[in-house]
Amino acid sequence: MPPTACYLHGVQAGTLPFVTGQMPVDPDRPDAPLPPSTATAVHGCRRPRLPSSTAAVVHGGRRSRRPSSITQQYALATPDLRLIVEDAGDSLQRTLFARIFLGWWRSVGWPSDERSARPRPGHGQGQRASADGAAASVSAAPRRPMQAAVQRQRQAASRRLARMEKTLSTERPSTIAPVCLVIGALFGLAGSFAPSASLRGIAWGIDGTALIVAAALLAVHCLRQDHPSVAAGFLVFIAGQALVLSGSAMSLEASSPLFAAGAALWAAALVLISAAKVMPRVVRVLGGVAALLFALTALQVFAGRTLTPLSEPLPFLAYPVFVLTLFGWAWWCRDPRPAGRATRNAA
């Protein structure tokens, strides 16, 4: 017991005496005095000098700091409990609740033939209840904390964390995303060859809507996978595609400024998405080429040159590369792990 602790052998609440845990000590010296700190008042708390065998702890037939077995420890601690309970006018036969604190199994000396019947480490608190009356607690001289229980808890937490990381690393985007990417790519390419302005507007309207939905889903997925730059790229792509979509119903000449602004944002988005090592290398290369072509187109329009969405060579030549990039994104949705990790797992 720490010398500075305010220690009482027992406290009575109503008809129930609550007994403090007792150490296993040598009953051959029942008259040995308590340590000085156990008979003085600390912070106004006066502790009684009850008869207690707190002189020496037995270990293997000789006086030592700890007993050699849990059976011997329990036998040494019980007399102290009986003295305290009887002093309160009760008996151990009326014990309502008892708790035994066990230390590490080797430190309490389990016999080899009892190993099969002993409880598992980490479950060292035994509880016993009988009739109403006294409540007692006995301490079995714990030597060190339950290291095995702590280690098992840490291992279980590590396994749960590994399962969560595996689930996140193998989580695929919504199946709507690749479908919308393919629809957007096909309708966008079809609109470039539409025979009339009305069909072109319908095709590009479907194209823009599908690509915005796909980019939004992919942005959410990349945020959950801790790819913030790629998620930012898809958000920028949404902004650019919204500008291009707003000019789908206009004539080609009237939609030129909106298309130039959208192409500039397309280029920035493709750079953000392709710079991170998340997509396959081929898809990243295609995205970089498409970003360069769209950037050149936007610069020409911003410089005052009259270009339409179907002007040749730019931006018309950028569309096939852009479509292949969209197909690559859709293919990546089948296995959205980073390229390096996917290669290592395959190996």
Image (cartoon, grey):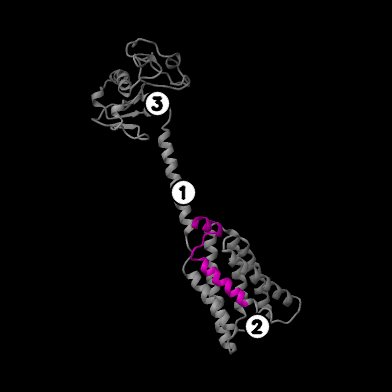
| Residue beneath disc 1 | 161
Residue 344 among those drawn in magenta? yes
Give the overall secondary structure of the magenta segment: helix
Please identify the quadrant where the N terminus is shown.
Answer: top left
Foreground mark, 3 or 2, reads 2
Q: Position of residue 11 (x, y in %)?
A: 35, 24
Residue beneath the point at 62% across and 75% down: 243
Residue 7 appears in which quarter of the rendering?
A: top left
Query: Could you tell me how far apart the alpha carbons at marks 2 and 1 are, in whole angstroms?
Result: 52 Å
Identify the residue at the far front of this view: 347
Q: Secondary structure at mark 1?
A: helix
Foreground mark, 3 or 1, reads 1
Which labelled disc corresponds to residue 310? 2
| Residue beneath disc 3 | 142
Q: Are marks 3 and 1 in contact (CB under 8 Å)?
A: no
Stretch in magenta: 319-347
Q: What's the amino acid at mark 1? A: Leu
Residue in front for this viewpoint, 140 or 98: 140
Q: Secondary structure at mark 2?
A: loop
Q: Position of residue 12 (x, y in %)?
A: 33, 25
Q: Decide if residue 72 is on the left or right side of residue 298.
A: left
Note whether residue 20 is visible: no
Q: What's the amino acid at mark 3? A: Pro
Residue 149 appears in which quarter of the rendering?
A: top left
Mark 2 / mark 1, whichever is N-terminal: 1
Within 10 Å of disc 1 (Cα), the crowding (few <14, some 14-19, many 20+) is: few
Q: Are marks 3 and 2 in contact (CB under 8 Å)?
A: no
The relative height of residue 194 versus residue 340 in the rendered view (above or below) is below
